Every structure is written in structure tokens, then in C-alpha cells.
Amino acid sequence: MKKAHEKIFSFSLLAGIVFTVLIWVFALSLIEADRQNSPYAVFLDVGQGDSALISLPQSIQILIDTGESASVLSKIEKNMPRFDRRIEYLVLTHADSDHIGAADDILQSFEVGEVIVGPSKSDTQVYKKIEALISENKIQKREVFSGDVICPIESACMDFLSPDRGGSYGSTNEQSLVFRFNFLDKKIMFTGDAEDEIQAKISNKYDSERLKSEVLKVAHHGSKAAIDEGFLGEVGPSQAIISVGANSYGHPSANIIEVLKNNTIEVLRTDQRGDIKMELW
């Protein structure tokens, strides 16, 4: 009789443990499901480079630039929903290595639905490898210009403002894709490395309603020509993100920091804060 009671007790204990584990697994799955449906943007700390990840409902992931090092992979995995290995849109703003240098690692580590590029090209080995991987994996590649709009879902769009189709540009920085990302009422202005002259052209071309954004990703790591004040006034951000690392260029410029602070704009730097995450609800 004693042994029978011991068996019943052991079985009850085991059943209780299994039940508790199942409850925890169910709870974690609910948390993960909620995380996957909570939209956010993360400006990744990739050192002296640019990379930002946007996660939208319906498990839509948009990666804007990649930085230069494969270390970005662990940051993307940390910030993407668990078990999600697909990036729907890889946006490469221009062909400089500090923006596309890890794109080959991305293309080999994740399933990529579509690559969005501007007219900027390069004869570097990394650029050629990226082109080869896009071709080998039969990934759709789309070249965009000002006036083009891509909407991954009905409530989220990328509105491209520069460069102009057929325009004359003197450098890869000037050919950077500049676009406003809109999700419901949240707007983020991405500028690549397009500095003050390009920004002035944009603000002359579009009215303020087309440019107004809560967040500005400051161009070219906060270089001395990173901001046109007319453009800044039209965008009217409350926050400015500077993606920057240790460098010998003097980035970010003290003058640029002063301009932002004089306009009562909160400055957030990846070299000081690491990854910068913001909810999009």
C-alpha cells in the first residue's frame, strides 16, 4: 500500500511539473506573439556606420543599411522576433562600405525578399559580391527614385524623396536614398549620407507636410555638412539619431550638435547609448 501511495505521489508530482512547464511555454508564446505584433524601430550600434531595423505587424522586417562588420548579425537576431529568419526589405541607401559592408553577410544568413537600392554603384569587391548574391539567390532588386512609394503593409510606407531620376550627382553620398518612413502617425526621416546641399533641394521641392517627421536620422554620422537648417526646420523633429563610432573625421561635428540643441531637439547617439530602440505605436 505504501509503495502504491509513493507511485501516486510521484506521478502527481511529475504531472504537476509537466503542467507548470506547459503553462510557462504557453505564456512565453503569448509574449513572443505580442512582441512580433508590436512595431518598433532600432537604430543599431554598428560603430562608424549606419544600420536600422524596423519591425512591423504581420512579421514584416525592414533593414536599412548594414554597417560594415558582420557583428551586425547578432544585433539583428537579438532584435528580430524569435525564429524569424526573413527580412522582407533590405534597403541599401548608397554604395559606401560603412552602409553596405555587411550586406553580403545578411544575404547569406537571412532570407531576403527584396533589395531596394538607388543609383549609387561601386567597383569594390564587397559591392560585386552583393550583386552576385542577389543574382544567385534570384532576389528581386528594385531601383527607386524620388516620387516612388513602397508600402510593405497598408499602414506603413517608405516615401522616397531623393535622388531624382536622371539627376546629376557628384558623389555616392549625394546619390543616397532619402525617404520618410510612415507608420500610422509615426514618421522617421532617413537621410543616408545626403548632406546639406541635397537636403536644401529636397526642402525646395516638397512642402513641409511631405517632410514633417518626429525623428530625423542625421546624415553622414553628423559630419559638419550633415544638416541644412531649412530642411531641419521643415522636418521639425523632436529627436535626432546620430549613428557614429570611433573615427578620425571629427564626427559628429560640434557645430551640428549645437544646431540640434538650439532647436530643442533631443540628440541620441549610438556611440553613447548603443542600440536605440523606439516603439512605433
Image (cartoon, rainbow, N blue to C red):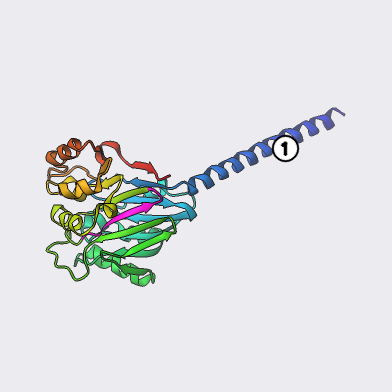
**Residue 71 visible (yes or no):** no
* Magenta: main secondary structure: strand
**Which percent across, then down, holds residue 87?**
41, 58
Indicate left or right for 226 with 39 as reference.
left
Q: Which residues are magenta?
A: 176-185
Neighbour tally class for label 1: few under 14, some 14-19, many 20 plus, Cα within 10 Å: few
Q: Residue at (28%, 55%) from the top-left corner?
A: 210
Camera-side residue of 74 and 41: 41
Q: Amino acid at mark 1?
A: Ala
**Which percent across, then down, holds residue 277?**
36, 42
Q: Is residue 184 magenta?
A: yes
In the rendered view, tell whether residue 118 sits above or below residue 221: below
Q: SS of the residue at dot 1?
A: helix
Camera-side residue of 166 and 192: 166
Q: How many marks?
A: 1
**Which percent across, then down, holds residue 54?**
38, 51
In the rendered view, tell whether residue 161 sits above or below residue 10: below
Residue assigned mark 1 = 15
**Residue 147 visible (yes or no):** yes
For the N terminus, the quadrant is top right
